[in-house]
C-alpha cells in the first residue's frame, strides 16, 4: 500500500485540480457560490450525454431481450457485449463535484502517507480537510465510500471529521442511514424530507455512500437532545452479529414506495406478519452460524416494531412524467415518516462527532475483516456455503485417508500390490467422491444457491487429487 501511495504522490497533479484547489483555498465569501454554480454547470454539461447514452442503453437492452426469446446465440453474445460497453460508457459519462472531492481526498491520503507535500501543490496538503469540512457545514455531502471502488478512504474521512469538530465543537448527532437498491428513490426521499440536493435531476443515480449534515433548529435542540442530523446514503443482521467491536444496536424502518392504495397499511397485516417471520428466521439462522445464542428475534439485533415501522408511500408523480405534477400524498407520507423518525430520535441521546469518527474507523476495519460475510447476499447463502465447506472437508478426508492407507500398506508390506493397483484403488475412491459431490449438488435443499460454487469445488477436489497423486508417487 505504501508503494502505491508513493506512486500517487510522485504523479503530476492535473492543471484542473491545481486551479480548483487554488480557487477553493481563497476562503472568501464567493467560495460556496462557486461550488453551487460548479455543481449546476457539471450537471448541465453531463446531462445531454447521459440522456443519449440512456436512450442507446434502453434500445440495446430491448434488442437483447428479443434475441433471448429467439435464442440466436451469436447475435445475442454480440448484443450483450455492446450493452456492457454502453453501460461502461454510461458510468464514465457521470461526472460531478463528488469526483473532484474524491481526487482531493486521494491527494491528501498520498501526502499524508509519505508525510510531505506534493511538489506541484501550491498549498499545504493539511489544509484540504478544512475545505471539505467547510463544504459539509454549507450543506454539501461528503463521499463516505467511493461508489466505483467500494472503498472508504478512512484517513481522509477522519481528517475531515476532525476539522468539523474543530469548527463546530464536539456536537451531538443523530445518524440516519437510508439503504435500498439502485434508483429506488432514496435520494428523492431525503431531498423531500430535509430539503437536500442529492443528485437526481441530471439522470444520475447516487453511487457509494454520502453523508450530509443537517443543522437542527434552536427550538428543537432541547427536545431532540442533539445539534445535527447526519444523513448517510448508501449490508445487515449477520454483519452486526459478527462485528462485536462496533457495538451497534440500531433501529430501522421499512418503506414501500409506489403503493397506490392509501389503506395498504391496514390491509397488509398478513404481509407484515410474514415479513417479521422471515426476519426472525434469518436472525436465528445467522445467530446459529455465528454461535450467538442470545439473538433469537430480529429485534434482538436491530430495534424494530412491525406495527409502526413499516410505511407505505404513494408514487412521487401524479400521472406520467415529464408533465406530471408531484403527488401530494407522497409529500404527506414523507412528512409522516419524518415525524416518526424525529419522535424516535428524541428518545435517543445521539452520539458526539468524536464517537462518530471512531465508529467510522471501527466499522470499516470490521468490514475489511469480515469480507466472508459481505461477499454473500443473505444469511441463507452463508449457511449453504458453510454446509458445502463441511462436505468438502469430508470429501478431502476420504481421499486423504485412502492415500494414508496405501502408504501404510507399502510400509508394512501387508499386501503385495503394484503401483498401478494402488493408483487404481485411489482413482476408484475419487469416483466415489465425485458421485457424492454430484448427489449433494443435485439433492440439497439449497441446490439453486449452491450451483454457482459447483465448478469451484470440483476444481478444488481435482487439484487436491492431483496433489495426493504426486505425493503417492514420492512415497512409493
Image (cartoon, helix red, strand yellow):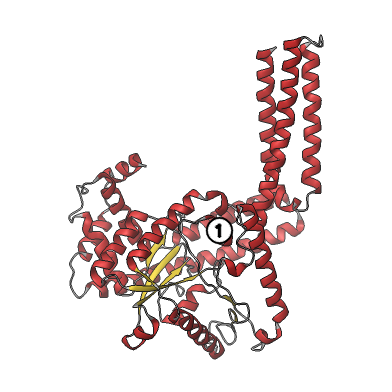
Query: As drawn, is 55 to the left or to the right of 73?
Result: left
> Mark 1 = which residue?
241
Query: Which residue is situated farthest in the front direction here?
Result: 294
The quarter of the displayed image where residue 440 is located: top right
Q: Residues within 10 Å of mark 1 (few under 14, many from 20)?
A: many
In the image, 316 versus 470, the foreground residue is 470
Q: Is residue 96 visible?
A: no
In which quarter of the view is residue 2 placed?
A: top left
- The residue shown at (60%, 61%) is 294
Locate residue 471, reporting x and y percent.
65, 19
Which secondary structure, mark 1?
helix
Q: Quadrant of the N terminus?
A: top left
The answer to which of 30 and 3 lies nearer the viewer is: 3
Residue plotted at (66% across, 54% down): 381
Where's residue 9, x and y in %? 28, 45
**Closest to the observer, 412 or 133:** 412
Residue drawn 64% across the image and 88% down it: 262
Say which residue appears at 27% left-offset and 57% top-offset: 17
Q: Is 230 above or below relative to 473?
A: below
Q: Position of residue 403 (x, y in %)?
A: 72, 22
Amino acid at each position: 500500500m505504501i508503494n502505491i501511495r508513493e506512486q500517487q504522490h510522485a504523479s503530476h497533479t492535473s492543471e484542473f485540480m491545481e486551479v480548483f484547489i487554488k480557487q477553493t483555498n481563497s476562503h472568501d465569501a464567493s467560495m460556496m457560490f462557486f461550488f453551487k454554480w460548479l455543481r449546476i454547470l457539471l450537471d448541465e454539461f453531463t446531462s445531454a450525454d447521459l440522456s443519449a447514452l440512456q436512450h442507446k442503453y434502453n434500445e440495446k437492452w430491448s434488442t437483447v431481450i428479443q434475441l433471448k426469446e429467439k435464442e440466436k446465440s451469436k447475435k445475442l453474445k454480440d448484443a450483450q457485449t455492446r450493452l456492457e460497453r454502453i453501460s461502461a460508457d454510461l458510468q464514465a459519462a457521470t461526472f460531478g463535484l463528488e469526483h473532484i472531492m474524491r481526487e482531493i481526498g486521494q491527494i491528501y491520503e498520498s501526502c499524508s502517507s509519505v508525510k510531505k507535500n506534493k511538489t506541484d501543490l501550491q498549498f499545504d496538503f493539511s489544509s484540504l480537510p478544512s475545505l471539505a469540512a467547510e463544504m459539509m457545514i454549507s450543506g454539501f455531502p461528503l463521499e463516505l465510500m467511493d461508489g466505483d471502488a467500494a472503498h472508504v478512504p478512512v484517513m481522509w474521512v477522519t481528517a475531515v471529521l476532525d476539522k468539523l469538530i474543530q469548527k463546530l465543537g464536539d456536537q451531538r448527532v443523530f445518524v440516519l442511514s437510508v439503504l435500498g437498491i439502485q434508483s429506488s428513490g432514496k435520494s428523492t426521499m431525503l431531498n423531500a424530507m430535509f430539503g437536500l440536493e442529492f443528485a437526481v435531476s441530471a439522470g444520475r443515480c447516487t453511487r457509494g455512500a454520502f453523508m450530509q449534515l443537517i443543522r437542527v433548529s434552536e427550538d428543537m435542540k432541547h427536545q431532540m437532545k442533539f445539534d445535527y442530523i447526519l444523513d448517510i446514503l448508501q449490508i445487515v443482521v449477520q454483519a452486526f452479529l459478527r462485528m462485536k467491536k462496533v457495538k451497534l444496536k440500531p433501529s430501522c424502518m421499512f418503506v414501500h414506495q409506489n403503493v397506490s392504495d392509501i389503506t395498504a397499511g391496514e390491509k397488509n397485516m398478513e404481509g407484515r406478519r410474514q415479513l417479521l417471520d422471515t426476519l426472525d428466521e434469518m436472525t436465528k439462522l445467522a445467530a446459529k452460524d455465528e454461535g450467538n445464542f442470545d439473538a433469537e428475534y430480529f429485534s434482538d439485533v436491530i430495534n424494530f416494531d412491525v406495527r409502526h415501522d413499516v410505511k407505505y408511500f404513494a408514487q412521487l408523480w401524479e400521472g406520467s412524467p415529464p408533465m406530471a405534477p408531484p403527488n401530494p400524498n407522497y409529500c404527506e407520507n414523507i412528512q409522516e415518516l419524518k415525524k416518526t423518525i424525529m419522535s424516535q430520535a428524541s428518545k435517543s441521546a445521539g452520539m458526539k462527532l468524536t464517537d462518530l469518527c471512531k465508529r467510522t474507523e471501527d466499522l470499516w476495519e470490521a468490514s475489511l475483516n469480515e469480507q466472508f460475510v459481505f461477499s454473500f447476499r443473505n444469511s441463507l447463502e452463508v449457511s449453504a456455503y458453510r454446509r458445502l465447506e463441511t462436505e468438502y472437508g469430508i470429501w478431502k478426508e476420504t481421499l486423504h485417508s485412502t492415500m494414508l492407507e496405501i502408504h501404510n500398506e507399502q510400509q508394512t508390506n501387508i499386501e503385495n500390490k503394484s503401483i498401478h493397483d494402488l493408483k487404481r484403488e485411489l482413482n476408484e475412491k475419487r469416483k466415489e467422491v465425485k458421485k457424492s459431490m454430484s448427489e449433494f449438488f443435485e439433492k440439497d435443499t439449497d441446490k439453486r444457491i449452491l450451483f454457482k460454487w459447483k465448478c469451484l469445488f470440483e476444481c478444488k477436489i481435482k487439484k487436491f487429487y492431483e496433489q495426493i497423486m504426486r505425493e503417492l508417487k514420492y512415497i512409493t
